Image (spheres, grey):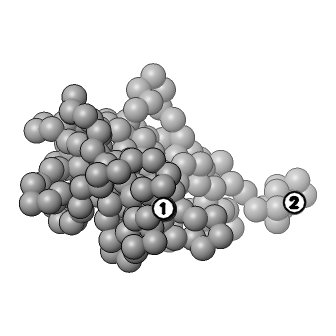
């Protein structure tokens, strides 16, 4: 749960495709800041800086204090588009975050203790059903990841969301069932052994 990171932006007076192209030619990426019952604001950010942040990972779960012409606003990225040929950012959207805001975010799952899973030791394979899980989380404490422990899992066992310890205030979007995050599946050699037995 990292602190908000600083990001500088400038207000973009013009809207539309022509103004956006002019920003890109100037080495900037056009974007929009919206939400909190305020009008949407057209902005632009430095192309190199925003590209580095996107490719560093966890961009869509990072809270930023964006400074637009001297005024700071707390935001979270909601979407970005990349040029399909050059793979560079061409647009980015941010959502304003009010005090105490709870937002929906996709959080990556990290798996630990594979060596403590008897099923994996016997040749089973970890089958990841969900690489990320959607949660409602307070904007001030979005987890960078959740940790799923594989200790004790046998072949054909499943790991469900109820087995994962979640940070305080973080709740899965899916609440009506105990969904599966991963399973231990048998290898083809194990299946042949069982058939022979």
Q: Residue at x 37, y 69 (%)?
A: 28
Q: Position of residue 90 (x, y in %)?
A: 48, 62
Q: Is residue 88 above or below residue 188?
A: below
Q: Image quadrant of residue 98? A: top left
Query: Which quadrant is the N terminus positioned in?
Result: bottom left
Q: Nearer the viewer, residue 152 or 197?
A: 152
**Residue closest to the eye, 167 or 14:** 14
Q: Position of residue 77 (x, y in %)?
A: 34, 52
User: Could you tell which of marks 2 and 1 lies nearer the N-terminus?
Assistant: 1
Q: Residue furthest top?
A: 176
In front: 7, or 157?
7
Residue 52: tell me if it is visible. Answer: no
- In this image, 37 relative to 94: left or right? left
Between residues 197 and 61, which one lies in front from this camera angle?
Answer: 61
- In this rendering, position of residue 188 left or right of residue 52: right
Residue 115 can be seen in this image: yes
Residue 26 image offset from top left, x and y in percent: 39, 73
* Residue that carries the numbered disc 2 in the rendered image: 192
Residue assigned mark 1: 21
Q: Secondary structure at mark 1?
A: helix
Circle count: 2
Q: Identify the residue at horizontal 48%, vertical 41% (top origin).
A: 160
Q: Quadrant of the C terminus?
A: bottom right
Q: Describe residue 33's horizontal placement relative to residue 163 as left or right.
A: left
């Amino acid at each position: 749960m990292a602190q908000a990171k600083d990001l500088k932006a400038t207000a973009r007076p013009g809207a539309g495709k022509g103004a956006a192209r002019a920003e890109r030619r100037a080495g900037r990426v056009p974007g929009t800041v919206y939400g909190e019952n305020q009008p949407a604001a057209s902005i632009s950010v430095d192309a190199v800086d925003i590209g580095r942040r996107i490719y560093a990972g966890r961009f869509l779960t990072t809270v930023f204090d964006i400074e637009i012409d001297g005024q700071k606003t707390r935001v979270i990225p909601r979407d970005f588009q990349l040029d399909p040929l050059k793979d560079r950012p061409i647009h980015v959207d941010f959502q304003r975050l009010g005090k105490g805001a709870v937002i929906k975010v996709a959080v990556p799952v990290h798996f630990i203790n594979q060596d403590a899973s008897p099923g994996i030791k016997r040749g089973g394979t970890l089958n990841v059903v969900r690489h990320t899980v959607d949660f409602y989380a307070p904007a001030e404490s979005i987890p960078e990841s959740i940790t799923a422990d594989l200790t004790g899992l046998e072949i054909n066992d499943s790991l469900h969301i109820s087995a994962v310890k979640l940070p305080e205030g973080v709740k899965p979007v899916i609440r009506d069932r105990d969904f599966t995050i991963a399973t231990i599946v048998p290898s083809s050699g194990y299946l042949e052994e069982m058939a022979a037995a």
